[in-house]
Amino acid sequence: MRFNRLRLNGFKSFVDPTDLVVAEGLTGVVGPNGCGKSNLLEALRWVMGENRPTAMRGGGMEDVIFAGAATRPARNFAEVSLLIDNSDRLAPAEFNDSDILEVVRRITRDAGSAYKIGGKDVRARDVQMLFADASTGAHSPALVRQGQISELINAKPSNRRRILEEAAGISGLYQRRHEAELK
Ligand code: ATP
Ligand code: MG
């Protein structure tokens, strides 16, 4: 699954709409400390359905909304949009009618998160499953957080196994089995 463009609006330090165009090959983000490099990766995880505030370095999910600065008032919402190249038709049938798929997550203060795939309102789970099946997703080993390499080296075998399963693209199947067992 290839990402074409990440768009942030009101997400953390990215108060004005900002596009990160992901070209073919390796994409690097460089800049001084505190300029927002980690925030960009967090936006990518967030739009794929990350729901742990700690993974966003926050106490609550609303902490991703631009909190204001000396010259700018705080915002009431944050929105991140991700354009995916779907020319290989990896998405589930209901979303599979176009080459480019847009996934949008928006959080509004006191109203929580809303998700869209290809313009249709969907649940968080639909977004999470879309990426889990393509072996990417919020917990993908392709996204390496600061400090994660040393965590991996020190991880318990069971945690290391989870990371390998995610890389192998079978975590979506585990999720479905778990839900089937609950029914
Ligand atoms: P480093 O090189 O140190 O890792 P970085 O480029 O990864 O830095 P980030 O951690 O992505 O930088 O950005 C941190 C900045 O984002 C801080 O200035 C912080 O104040 C700002 N920030 C985080 N959350 C919000 C928010 N909700 N509203 C406004 N600014 C925020
Ligand atoms: Mg950083």
Image (tube, rainbow, N blue to C red):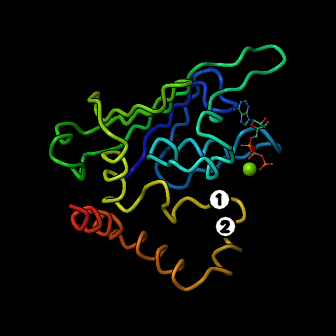
Q: Position of residue 86 (x, y in %)?
A: 28, 45
90 left or right, relative to 62 = left
Q: Residue at x 81, y 13 (%)?
A: 71
| Quadrant hosting residue 116 | top left
Q: Residue at x 23, y 68 (%)?
A: 181
Q: Which residue is mark 2?
A: 148
Q: Residue at x 71, y 26 (%)?
A: 67
Rendered-image quadrant of the N terminus: bottom left
Type of the residue with mark 2? Gln
Q: Position of residue 3 (x, y in %)?
A: 42, 46
Question: Do the CB atoms of the residues marked 2 and 1 lie less than 8 Å apart?
Answer: yes
| Quadrant hosting residue 164 | bottom left
| Quadrant hosting residue 32 | top right
Type of the residue with mark 1? Arg
16 left or right, relative to 181 = right
Q: Position of residue 70 (x, y in %)?
A: 84, 17
**Which quadrant of the picture is home to ligand 1?**
top right
